[in-house]
Amino acid sequence: MEKYVINVNGKDREVSALQDMPLLWVLRDLLDMKGTKFGCGQALCGACTVHLDGEAVRSCSLPVSEVGTGKITTIEGLSEDGSHPLQKAWVEHIVPQCGYCQSGQIMNAAALLSRNPSPSESEIEAAMEGNLCRCGTYNRIKDAIVTASKSL
Amino acid sequence: MMPNLPFLKKKQPEDRSEIFRASRRDFLKIGSLAAGGLVLGVNFQCSGPKGELVTFAPNVFVSIGSDNLVTILAHRSEMGTGIRTSLPMIVADELGADWSKVKIVQAEGDESKYGNQNTDGSFSVRMFYEPMKKAGATARHMLMQAAAKEWGVDVAECDTENSHVVLKGGSKKIPFGDLVAQIQTMELPKAEDVPMKDFSSYKLVGKDIPIYDVKDIATGNAVFGADVNLPNMLIAVVQRSPVVGAKVVSYNDEKALAIPGVKKVVKIEGPGLPAGLDKPLEGVAVLAENTWAAIKGSRELEIEWDLGPNQSYDSAVQLEEMVKSTTSNGTAKRERGNFSQAKSSSGKVIEKTYLAPFYAHSTIEPPAAIADVKADGSVEVWAPSQHPQWARDAVSAALGIDVSKVKMNVTLLGGGFGRKSKPDFVAEAALLSKAAGVPVRVQWTRECDLHHDYYHSHSAQRIVATLDGSGNLTGWNHHTVFPAIGSGLDAAPPSDGELDLGCRDFPYEVPNIRIESHETTAHTRIGWLRSVSNIHHAFAICTMLDEIAETKGVDPVDQALQLLGEDKNLTFAGEMVGDYGNYGEKIEDFPWSTARMKKVIETVAEKSNWKSNLAAGKAVGFAAHKSFLTYVACVVMVEKDANGNLVIPEVHYAVDCGIPVNTDRVRSQFEGGAQFATSLATTSAITLENGRVKQNNFDTYQIIRMSQAPKKIHVHIIPSMEKPTGVGEPPVPPFIPALANAVYKLTGKRNYQLPFQV
Ligand code: FES
Ligand code: FES
């Protein structure tokens, strides 16, 4: 076990973990932040997506030892009150079905919009390709991203 | 012996009356019980000393506080269909509640209190539309009676809106909360005295209403199966029988226990064979302080297995054997006219064989459950369960305790599709908590999920169609074979219940029909997946009909309308061998209406401009299929992109589901159904070799990604005042053949096997 100080949603948090423990389990089990979800553990589904210095990363495949001084943002830290344009667009389009994949979808979309504020349909598809939704909300996700991009 | 199919569970007459018997009892108790003493199991407060919150709860589903807050209990499981919103909408609308001041509370699993909670088979709305209306209407009537008395008017002069009783004409109004004290002692009205609202006055039912949890989901605050945290909880990851029926001979846990954080290793005793539908598989669990240590520990286990009789099973070999069996005579399950005669006198015979694979549910949330076995032997459970009472029963059986000692909390489900009806994972958590003496969360990994599912059966079908000299379809002979739900090593045919899912209920006017089933065995756990055997049956039937239309040189939409014939209600009387199930409903209550089917077909043809000319490089396909008492027709358009990949630019659905309760959720189920079906049609398959599932994760068991999804999905809902029927499953079956038929037109190559490559 090693001690790590990681910066999550603007706060330094000290945790003690095996060095290969993925950030996902640090967040969920050690810090009791349950917004980030487990879907595959192999960077194949995107349910665990968070930001590391603004880039979307799959937290299930990022060992805590590699986080370093990078700033982590999770769904809980995307906005204080659900007021991020994507969160508002998600509500407006009633995107979720079961909802389980949606934290990851929103975090991935947020990273997309911060580097490309008005993505085309094919750019949205390319950027969101790593995020699976079994319920089939892809169309509404796309629509919501477009709506959010217009309000940026 | 076939088990009852829980997703077809007959509606018990008690389901309805129980609610109201219970409600009367509850009501009478209200005056005397202390807070929390109500049979509601949630924090409804009852009458207390002056100035405190007083609550009126005319039945288990609705309560109104003196603070004017209306609380409605959701007793069905939310897995993405929107049921947690839709049923409360019905109560609120009938009551006249201000929807923005309605709180929804999830009910515990307890069918003695709430009636059927098995959220499966697309029957929640069908079964509970009327009871929910009555729940709301009863409360409304009593509130109006109280207000009428206060105002000295006739109750007929009163109405409700925005959580107020109003005097018609608008001169007076009073909030519900102010009337709560008065109605504490009021007698519960007789059901026949309670007026129901006219549909036209509904403000919620029949409209687009956002789901209750949408904000919580968008902010990461929604609570799913694995999200409950308990003090001192250990996390368990289990290595289960790699082959169904395998037993542990011995295991070495030294290396597992050496991983920091690993606390304990516990063997789970499985039933061996038959594996059953509600028992954990045999396995060895690693319990650790966190999920990562448990995952690592489970990888370090060294287990010696006695693999048992399924170790040489190969699904591809069985598929070939099943194909062969369809060429022999099976057991007749429906007979009309004389097919053999039709065949011998026919001008043309079309004979095709259709194959479909095993499918896994692969909900993005893998199974997870939490149990806390207490020192007194009772247990509290949290799980994303589709069938909470079954989970409760399974826990009670696993621990050998009375079911009253099992408190069953239901979280949100991160997808269900039939997987989370089975309570095996919930029983695991209970057994492990008992063994460890602390709360335990059992966490399935994706590999666990794909290796140990209750799969949708793979299948072989052969359809023989005969045409007479003038091209009329004169004979239809459908052979079907697949390992039946819950079956095992003893050869068995599909159950009648499975044949009634889109095979025996073939609705077309063909003078000679013979439906035959064949026996086979099961070597893995077979369950049900969104629309069940409708998936493969509709694929075979609707692509065969397309092929017949092509042979005859007629339009497939025209052919379907013509084959449905005059407007009539089908009963299949005298033709079925054994009873026809009709999804658990009496055929008099839910007739098979050719008129409603024709209407959805005509609508989808019109809305999709079926007969208009298409741009070069595009093609469209059509299919129509009724399932779960909902009528659906579908048109799918396809093209190829520059790289030769299949693209689905547009889909049109027409659906008649009776009264659509939440039109937005009807649409979202069809949007999702089209995407789910795209995966079944083009990307997903489970195969087994040496008794083991070969697919491990989403790299090898693929479901569609965003770029593969249909781009535009139009859902045309037929306005209807018929009894409401479900929409969770019906979108899936017709989509697959409509897509297959479109792909054929695009490529000139017919696909007879799922998933198909384009
Ligand atoms: S859980 Fe990380 S990508 Fe699936
Ligand atoms: S909403 Fe259920 S998996 Fe995406």
Image (cartoon, rainbow, N blue to C red):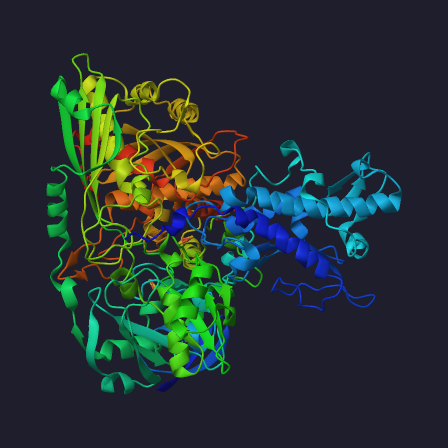
The answer to whether any part of residue B144 appears in the image is yes
Report the front residue among B527 and B367: B527
Q: Nearer the viewer, residue B224 or A23?
A: B224
Residue B406 in the image: state x and y as whole percent: 49, 70
Q: How many numbered discs? A: 0
Q: Position of residue B165 (x, y in %)?
A: 78, 44
Q: Quadrant of ligand 1?
A: bottom left
Residue B556 percent across, percent down from the top left: 28, 22
Q: Nearer the viewer, residue B369 or B279?
A: B279
Image point 13% across, 17% down: which residue? Answer: B345
- Please give the name of the residue rendered at 35% of the width and 41% of the height, measured from the top-left corner: B732
Q: Residue B561's quadrant in the figure?
A: top left
* Residue B575 position (above or below residue B532): above
Direction from residue B695 to residue B108 in the image, left or right: right
Which residue sits at x=43%, y=65%?
B393
Residue lying furthest right in this view?
B152
